[in-house]
Amino acid sequence: MSSAWTLGDWLQYLFSFIFVIGLLLALLWGLRKLQNGALLMRKSTQRLQTLETLSVGPRQKIMLIRLDEREILVGVTAQHMTVLTPLMAASECEPAEIENTTP
């Protein structure tokens, strides 16, 4: 009985390993999409949506939330949430013009 590994054995183990790692990555990607609700069917009557999220620290982030036709900017920490802007209609939200202060 020979215990020497042939090139075919190495290739079989290599491809099996790559297949298992690829399967795990695909599963993790799918679970992340499910968590964000991208693959779930959304109701047409859904009133609350998270438009954007920006991480500003290890446990702090800023979220732009739409409630009906209004957008709210919220600061989120591990302990609480704070409204950063008042309720505004989505049509009232215009991008601010930035002045060039450099000569």
Image: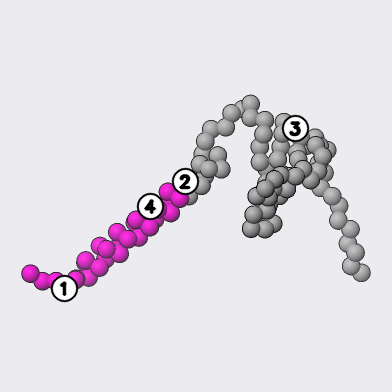
Name which of mark 3 and mark 2 comes first in the sequence: 2
**Residue 70, percent from left and from top:** 76, 35
Q: CA distance from mark 4 to mark 2?
A: 11 Å
User: Can you say whether 16 is above or below 91 in the image?
Assistant: below
Q: Amino acid at mark 1?
A: Ala
User: Can you say whether 87 is above or below 101 in the image?
Assistant: above
Write down the region rendered in magenta: 1-28
Name which of mark 3 and mark 4 comes first in the sequence: 4
Q: Report if residue 6 lies within the magenta region.
A: yes
In this picture, residue 100 sits left or right of residue 31: right
| Residue corresponding to mark 2 | 30
**Labelled disc at residue 77:** none
Q: CA distance from mark 2 to mark 1?
A: 40 Å
**Residue 54, percent from left and from top:** 68, 52
Considering the numbered disc 3 on the image, is that residue within a helix, a strand or a loop?
Answer: loop
| Residue corresponding to mark 4 | 23
Q: Residues at badges 4 and 1 in contact (C-beta under 8 Å)?
A: no
Considering the numbered disc 1 on the image, is that residue within a helix, a strand or a loop?
Answer: loop
| Residue corresponding to mark 1 | 4
Q: Amino acid at mark 4?
A: Leu
Name which of mark 4 and mark 1 comes first in the sequence: 1
Q: CA distance from mark 3 to mark 4?
A: 40 Å
